[in-house]
Amino acid sequence: MNKFNFDDAPNSAYQFLAGDVQTQIEKTGDKTKRTFSGVAYHGGQIDDHWYWGNLVFDLDNLDLANGKVPMLVEHDRDQRCGFINSHNIGDAGLSIEGTLLSNEHGTTIANDADEGYPWQMSVSITPKRVETVESGTVTVNGRTFNAPVTIFRSNTIREVSFCALGADRHTSAQVFNENRDHTTPKGDNVELEQAKAKITELEASLSQEQADKQAAIDALNEFKQAKREQDIEALATKTGQEFSEDKLTALKSMDETSFSMFASMMPAKTEQGKGVQLSQELFNEQATHGVQARDTGGSFETKFNEWSKA
C-alpha cells in the first residue's frame, strides 16, 4: 500500500549508494575518452537504510529519465561530470554504461581515480509507489525477502552521482582505470554523515517555522497599530479635539482595555462645536495604567468627571 507521503521524505532519502562501478579508458584518435561501466544496483536488499529501513527496488518497469541519465558530483546539478549511455537489467541487477565529460568535473573524477581515490556512487531513484510489507515474505526481482521491508515500485532513475561518501552505509565503490585492480572495498559506515544531514534539515525546518511565526507577529502588530490610528482619528472627530504629539503618543501606548474605557468616557463635542479639553495627566494615567504616583490623587473616573465639567 502507499503508506508514505512522498513530500514528507527529504530529497536525500531517495539517494542510494550504487553497486560496483568501474571506469575504463577508451582512446579515439588523438583524443582520450573516459568511460565507465558497472552494476548500479544488485537487485537485493539494502539493510537498515537511515530513512526507509530494509529496502528493495523493484526492477520491473524501471525507467531512466530522459534517456541519457546525468552523472553528477555529490548530486549537485551544477557539477555535471558525465552521462549514462545505456543500461541493462539481468541476473547481476541493474548494469550501466556511460561517458565522462572532458570538463573540470569529469576530469577531476578521472584524475582522482587514477591516483587511487575511492569514489563511491549514489543513484537517485524516485518510485511511483512505496509498499510496506510488515509481516510474512515478499518476492521481488526473483528473490524472497522477509518482513519488515519497504518496496519501491515503478521506479525512475533521475541521476547518478560520484560521491566522496556514499548515501548508504553498507556498500561502497572504487573508481579505477583499465589497468587497476577491479576489487571494490565494502562496508564504509556513513551513519554520522547521515545524522548530520538530518540535523541540518531539522534546523532549517525550525528556522523556517520561527521566521513564519515572527512574520505573523509582525503582521498582527502592524494591524493593531493601523487599527489604533483609525480609532484615534475617530475619537478626535467625536470630541472635536486635535490631539498634540504627546497625547497621540499616550493614546498609542494604551492597551486595548484602557483605550476602550478612555474612548467610551470621552464626551462628544458640544453643539457649538467646542470639544472638551482634557489634561495631559489623564492620558498619562491610562498610558501608564496608573502606576506612577500623582500629587492630585483620586481615581481615573473622578478625574475624568472633574475635567469634563470644567
Image (cartoon, rainbow, N blue to C red):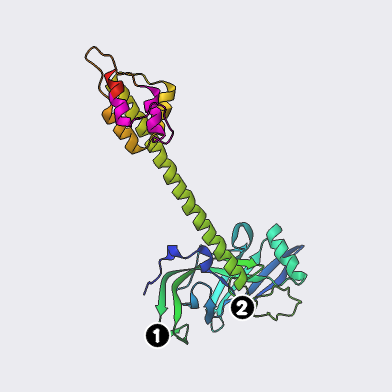
Q: Quadrant of the N terminus?
A: bottom left
Q: Position of residue 92 (x, y in %)?
A: 56, 82
Q: Nearer the viewer, residue 203 or 46?
A: 203
Residue most toward the left?
A: 271
Please tell me which residue is depicted at 38% across the width and 72% down the height of the picture: 3
> Which residues fall within the magenta stretch?
279-305
Marks 2/1: CA distance?
26 Å
Residue at disc 1, secondary structure: loop
Side (left or right) of 17 relative to 259: right
Label 1 neighbourhood size at 10 Å, few (<14), some (14-19), many (20+)? few
2 vs 1, front mark = 1
| Residue 154, quarter of the rendered image | bottom left
Side (left or right) of 51 relative to 260: right
Side (left or right) of 220 relative to 56: left
Residue most toward the top?
A: 272
What is the three-letter code of the residue carrying label 1?
Ser
In this orientation, does residue 162 appear? yes
Which mark identifies residue 171?
Answer: 2
- Residue tagged 1: 135
In the image, is residue 279 above or below residue 292? above
Find out whether residue 177 is within the magenta segment. Answer: no
Q: Nearer the viewer, residue 32 or 47?
A: 47
Please tell me which residue is depicted at 26% across the width and 30% down the height of the picture: 264
Find out whether residue 288 is within the magenta segment. Answer: yes
Q: Position of residue 110 (x, y in %)?
A: 72, 66
Please tell me which residue is depicted at 48% across the width and 52% down the height of the picture: 210
In the image, is residue 298 above or below residue 1? above
Q: Position of residue 297 (x, y in %)?
A: 37, 29
What is the three-letter code of the residue carrying label 2?
Thr
